Image (cartoon, rainbow, N blue to C red):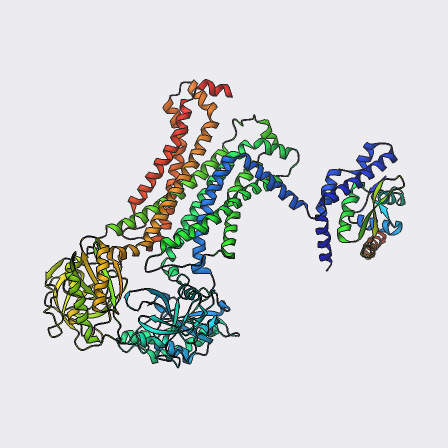
Amino acid sequence: MEWLNELGRRLRQLFRRKQWEDDLAEEMRLHLDLRAADKGSEAIAKRKFGNAALLREQSRGVWGWTFWDALAQDVRYAMRTLAANKGFAAAAILSLTLGIGANTAIFSIVNAVMLRSLPVEDPHRLVALHVGNAPGDRRRGAVVTNPIWEAVRDSQQAFSGVLAYSPDRFDLAAGGESHFSNGLWVSGDFFRVLGVPALRGRVFTTDDDRHGGGRSGPVAVVSYAFWQANFGGDSNVLGRTISLNRHNFEIIGVTPPWFRGLVADQPFDVAIPIGCEPLLHTDESALGHRSWWWLRMMGRLKPEATFEQAQAQMNSLAPEINRATVPTAWDAKGRERYLKRSFWLQSGAAGISITGSTYKTALFTLMSVVGLVLLIACLNIANLLLARATSRQREISIRLAIGASRSRVIRQLLTESLVLALVGAACGLLFSAWGARLLVRLLSTKTNQLDINLSPDLHVLAFTVAIAVLTGLLFGLVPALRATGIGPNQALKENARGAVHGGSRFTLGKALVTGQVALSLMLLTAAGLFLGTMRNFLKLDPGFNPHNVLVVQAAVPADRIQQKLRAPLFSKILSDLRRRPNVRSAASSTLAPVGHYFWNQDSHPEGYQPQPVEDDTLVNLNRVSPGYFRTMETRLLMGRDFSDRDTLASPQAMIVGEETARHFWANQNPIGKTITMDGPGKNNSYQVIGVVKDAKYAELNEPLLKTGFVASTQDAEPGPDLHFEIRFDGPMEALVAAVRPAIGAINKDAALEIRTLDARISDSLVQPRLVALLSSFFGMLALLLATIGLYGVISYAAARRRGEIGIRMALGAAEGAVTWLILRDVAFILAIGTALGIGASLVAGRFIKSLLFGLEPTNPETLAMAAAVLCASAIFAAYLPARRASKMDPMTALREE
Amino acid sequence: MRDEIPPGTLYMLILKTLMRGGELHGYEIANSIQQISDDILQVEEGSLYPALQRMLLKGWVTAEWGVTAGNRRARYYRLTAAGRKQLQTELAQFQRVNGAIQRILQTT
């Protein structure tokens, strides 16, 4: 407890500093006076007493104030110095604000979607359960079928609780234009295992999760935000019903505001039990289906169990579950592989994030880009500080000469740098709050609204402070070491302008600028590659004409519209659409073009010998109406389009893409060939009646795929939803306004989602566009910073060489020779910087390969372009001081010496 | 001939002086140490003051302002219970070390 008393005494004294100083001074004065009287001489008294100032300093040191005193002094002094150099301070703080702000903005998104723990009870005991043949099989293994989930739920002993969930979207509208909410299918134990209680009402029980609904019927739990937005926080919400995909669910509970679901960037609105799935999907339920992969599983480790124990238990359980759930429709090879799978535990504390997986590389690329920009800014400030250190040489030398220790002076110079960095960081934090929100808004699309919780937390704050301190040390340390490394004698001997000093500082400045050149070149190359990617996307021929096409997704209630009624209903809608004014043509398809969904099957083409290559016979399918290719403006190369004569009674017809025809029947006429599809069903043989030009199928950046189209008029089991493609003339708004009531008049329950094909494609380009935009912005910023740095160093060098240049000119050197003298340095810097930059770009390029489309990271044109832009601006920046030097009057220059 | 005091013994000397003298101010402490040691022990007088500050911090002494015989304000220091305990500890340690050194020196 002694140290506590000590601390108390320290603090008491701290609050009476002034008094303390006076007391000590008076005490010492008394001592000196008495001794002087005793010895009869003040000088002897003083000699016997020792260095009073030093002793006072030591006395202060006893109370531990020296460090803080010195710090306060240094900070005050730093503030004064910066205030006296407003231009320098403003330039440094602005570049730090941008640099640190951009870093913090991107980090706060990374933090929100990848690092932040789920706001649930003890998130570190939660693990995600993936399936696969190896632990790394993440992408495919994250989702399982309902039979797998139920087998795990009913037989596992490894966890104190397991849960399953699946994000989905539910249409809240009772009919007409769809109004989607973020839905979540959850298991009965979901909220209990997570430890999320109900704020109002109750959460689900295992009874609610029984197939077809429990004793309480179809029930729903809504989120706090949804409750506030749609019910105004009305406490009578319990017992009210909401319509989800036109089925009524009773609201039984509201979750607390801190629970936003397990998907970091898409907070849930409504959760319903997995057991209610058959109510929504009346045609075919996923509950018993062995190859519908849609559920994600998590488990909570038992209090005493370790991760490894739980993993071992799941390993031993896997074979039994695999045997019970193996998909019957799979071929022998697939089934064999399936039986060898196991369950793999992954840390689940951070939940999952759609943004996290989709944009991971993009976010990390942007993170590196802004990191490099900050580095360039640091080099710039270091260079400014170097130049400033030269003008402060005398000041520093005098300090050293009158006895300041080198470490003390370095400490004071570093304090200045840190003050700069922290002020920059504070501004950067404000800038990032705005920047991160802007970024999220730019990343959001109409159908994928991101809602990321960006409220700053300790992670973000710690990150910002850490990079501020790091940058402060980075740009401050070398100049501080430099400035104090010269002996005071030598520095004081020199004349005030520091004329002919060893060239070493000059070389360090050049080295820093060379680094800037290299880094800027990297950023410019990256920007060029991303811009090239964007250009490739934009000029890409998707195989159809995306302009002036409206895509209408229509879904009718499956339980009210029987299967045999659907085909007539859809064809009635289609013929109505075709009669509308301004509609040139209209068609329908099961999958929307480039709609991110796949429907593919293995096939047995007539006369084709399958090769042992992956996906060798896999064909990507779509079911389209007659006139689809004409509407999409996809060219029919051979044969004929579907027509109304292709009916259920006639032989099944197929139109294949060029690539399919080439792959299966390279040198033969594909028309008339038979192709048989894998999978259940009676009649799976199709006759090829036509070949169309290849078009993009699911994604714009997909490789060339084998595609096949079957006729909607030959669909024996039509689903309840469909896409209509309408090619129109004139204004889109009028058409949209007409389409909605037109379809509503035919079926009032049909849910509609209407968007142009252009807009749908544009949404899928959000990420490459944003990466291109931001990397160009930061690339230009880097170029600007590097150019300024170069300009600074060259003008400084030119100024230092005035005397030399004056002599040269007096001896008859021509203007051009003087200009070249200066530019030679620049050429040297550029040569080395460009070489380094190209090397670094080639190495770093590998990491961004997955973000590029249609060009390689080593693309020589892009590298050459970046180098040319950089060299041009560098030479422009250096030409000004070089020219100024060559224009000066030698007499003036020499007189100054 | 005057000798510097052995390092680390200043606290002990101050404590002992205060133990004997009761309430003393800095000048009196310095004088007292010199006189009793017959002017052999030489203290850089000013170094008393950082030492006294440290002792205040440790709680070995307390200080109070009073008036000297010559009617000047002076800070008088007095030993606390903790100070007495500290003196015993330091004395015991000093004598132990001193004794050991003596034994070595006397062994022929």
| Picture quadrant where residue A520 is located | top left
**Residue A676 spot, x, y in % from top left:** 17, 72
Please name whichever residue, A252 or A607, is drawn nearer the observer in this view of the structure.
Answer: A252
**Residue A68 spot, x, y in % from top left:** 65, 46
Q: What residue is shown at x 42% (from left), y 45% (from top)?
A: A373
**Residue A271 spot, x, y in % from top left:** 39, 70
- Is B95 placed left or right of A737 in the picture? right
State which quarter of the image contains the N terminus of chain A: bottom right
- Is A607 placed left or right of A748 in the picture? left
Please name whichever residue, A754 or A7, is drawn nearer the observer in this view of the structure.
Answer: A754
* Vertical position of residue A864 compared to residue A801: above or below: below
Q: What residue is shown at x 42% (from left), y 39% (from top)?
A: A785
| Picture quadrant where residue A4 is located | bottom right
- Is A284 placed left or right of A232 in the picture? left
Number of numbered discs: 0
**Residue A425 spot, x, y in % from top left:** 50, 47
| Picture quadrant where residue A214 is located | bottom left
